[in-house]
Image: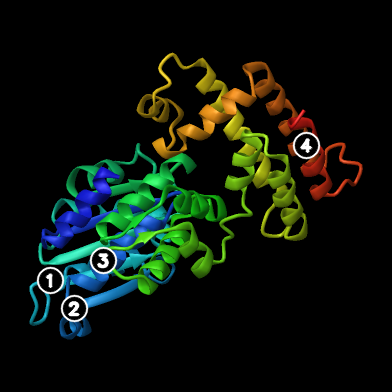
Amino acid sequence: MKDFKSILSDLDQRKFSPIYFLVGERETFFVDLIASKIENTVLSDEEKAFNQSILYGKDVTIEDVIGQAKQYPMMSEHRVIIVREAQSLLKTLDSLSSYVEQPQQSTILVFCIKYKKMDGRQKVTKLLKKEAVYFETKPLYDNQVPQWIFETLSASGFSIAPKASEMLVEFLGNNLSHIYKELEKLQHVLPKGSKITPEHVEENIGISKDFNNFELTKAIGVKDEVKAQQIVAYFAQNSKNHPILLTTAQLNSFFNKLLRYHALKDKSQSSAARALGVNPYFVKDYSFAAQKYSMKKASQAISLIREVDLKGKGVNSNQISNGDLLKELLVKLMR
């Protein structure tokens, strides 16, 4: 992430490199964001007509790209060449080596590689890492996404309540492109400087603040059977938006962290938050749950959840509905 921020900072300061090589094997959001920033900010609208080209790897050769990159800009300081779907050119990428060694300084050449892994043994890969701005993005883990949401909003003058952030992660997972679009939607409808609340998320994105996996986990943690049953009943009626495997994954994660919480010597809020990899706001949920579930009970809960997870995948399910599986799980967890 530091490299990503550094690249954006340099672009904001108009510190440009002749070559940007952007790789996203599984997570492509940052590749798109950097390329879009270069496309939209380096040249003025008047300059773009003669000095900006968007190419597609499947339609061109490396020689075509180099030929365009060597051209001088017209009535502009820079020429911008962006090669999208550049993974189609990987087999002939060695032909780029001579240009990487002596690039046209007035050209900003951007390669966008998606869903492919670079061969670090290749000479051209080593050369790009040495001579160009080489950025290879890795997916964020689910527990890293809330911090990314916080930082993204902070950069735009917004903040977000921890629960609202968790709602987005639960509903959208670690798909940063989808989350970013929803954050943009929220920023368009709310005044700058606003703190995004669960109510804002519910009203503008359609994620229920009361009936979600976060609230279900919280209810189970304090053994609030009435609320937990209400949420499970809602899930049963809206199974498409609340798949059982997402619920079991959330519950499994919670009880595994609860076991770790039990084992902590220092259970202070800040220390426990670091150890569990959660926002300090949520440490109290583990503190309350620890009073209801001993280490033995938490271990048993994990076994029960995994059993339901397998049934949800069709293993020994006997055609029991997902709603009934969750109701049965609740009964066992609340004992």
For marks 3 and 1, give the one nearer the viewer: 3
Q: Label 4: few (<14), some or many (≥20) within 10 Å?
A: some
Residue type indicated by callout 4: Leu
The residue that label 1 is drawn on is 78
Marks 1 and 2 in Cβ contact (< 8 Å): yes
Distance from Cα at disc 1 to Cα at disc 4: 63 Å
Say which of 77 and 176 sits in front. Answer: 176
Which residue carries the number 2 mark?
51
Label 3 vs label 2: CA separation?
Answer: 16 Å
Work out how far the residue at label 1 is from the one at label 2, CA to CA, in angstroms.
Answer: 7 Å
The label number, if any, that marks residue 329 in the structure image: 4
Quick one: label 3 or label 1, which is nearer the N terminus? 3
Q: Is residue 65 visible?
A: no
Q: Nearer the viewer, mark 3 or mark 4?
A: 4
How far is disc 3 from disc 1 in space, using C-alphas?
Answer: 15 Å
Secondary structure category for the residue under label 2: helix
